[in-house]
Image (cartoon, rainbow, N blue to C red):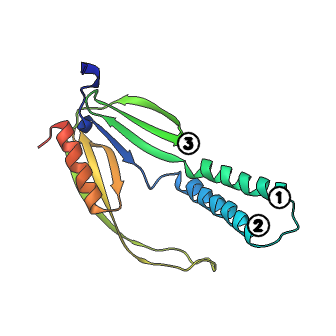
Amino acid sequence: MSNLTSQSKDDKFIYKNKNDETTGPRLLGYIFLASGIIVIIISLITDLETEHTKIALVSGAALVIGVILSSFNSRILFDFHSRKLKKYQSILWFKSGEWEQLPEIDKVELIHHSFRTSYIPNGITPTLNGQKTIYKIVLLANGAKFLALDFNREKDAIDALEKIKRALRIL
């Protein structure tokens, strides 16, 4: 095995951002996928007078658009071996982003951020209010916040915290 492939699995970490600007397009993609599947199922169950070509075009277009939109992702790739990070967006198999140099990280902290959610009633969707907790991993460089990573589950945040600390050799 050569030196180029001898990096350990712990040298890389991918943060999957769930609370980003791609949430809306992904949801719309799931709606298109569901509508395409519903059109196919209804055309198989019932005897429609619509041509099969039109049904195939409508359902096929909805499925293609749905696959594209639901594949939108925003992620951060950490390469601890090269001391770089890459914030990127991906659509299908295309990824777009630039590598940045990772500064000297002094400290990594886990912060529990609890807040009360409130939604303005709009007459269409139910209004839910409640307590929400987000678990933040904060990377500090030169005593200042360099990057914050949000997690919905405490277990995921602790696992990521341990992996980042191990890779950066922070006690």
Q: Image point 24% across, 38% down: which residue?
A: 10
The answer to whether the residues at label 1 and label 2 have Cβ atoms under 8 Å apart is yes
Give x and y (percent) for residue 46: 78, 73
Nearer to the camera, 43 or 116: 43
Q: Classify mark 2: helix, strand or loop.
A: helix
Mark 3 highlights which residue? 92
Q: CA distance from mark 2 to mark 3?
A: 29 Å
Please give left or right for residue 81 compared with residue 70 in the image: left
Q: Is residue 145 visible?
A: yes
Picture disc at residue 107: none
Give x and y (percent) for residue 124: 63, 78
Q: Going from the N terminus, do you reach mark 1 or mark 2 first?
A: 2
Furthest residue in direction top, as rendered = 2
Residue 155 drawn above or below residue 129:
above
Nearer to the camera, 57 or 122: 57
Q: Amino acid at mark 3?
A: Leu
Numbered circles on residues, count: 3
Q: Amino acid at mark 1?
A: His
The answer to whether the residues at label 3 and label 1 have Cβ atoms under 8 Å apart is no
Q: Quadrant of residue 12?
A: top left
Where is the C terminus found, in terms of image quarters? top left
> Badge 3, how many Cα within 10 Å: few under 14, some, many 20+?
few
Q: Image point 61% across, 56% down: which residue?
A: 29
Q: Image point 61% across, 47% down: which residue?
A: 68
Mark 1 highlights which residue? 52
Give x and y (percent) for residue 1: 24, 22
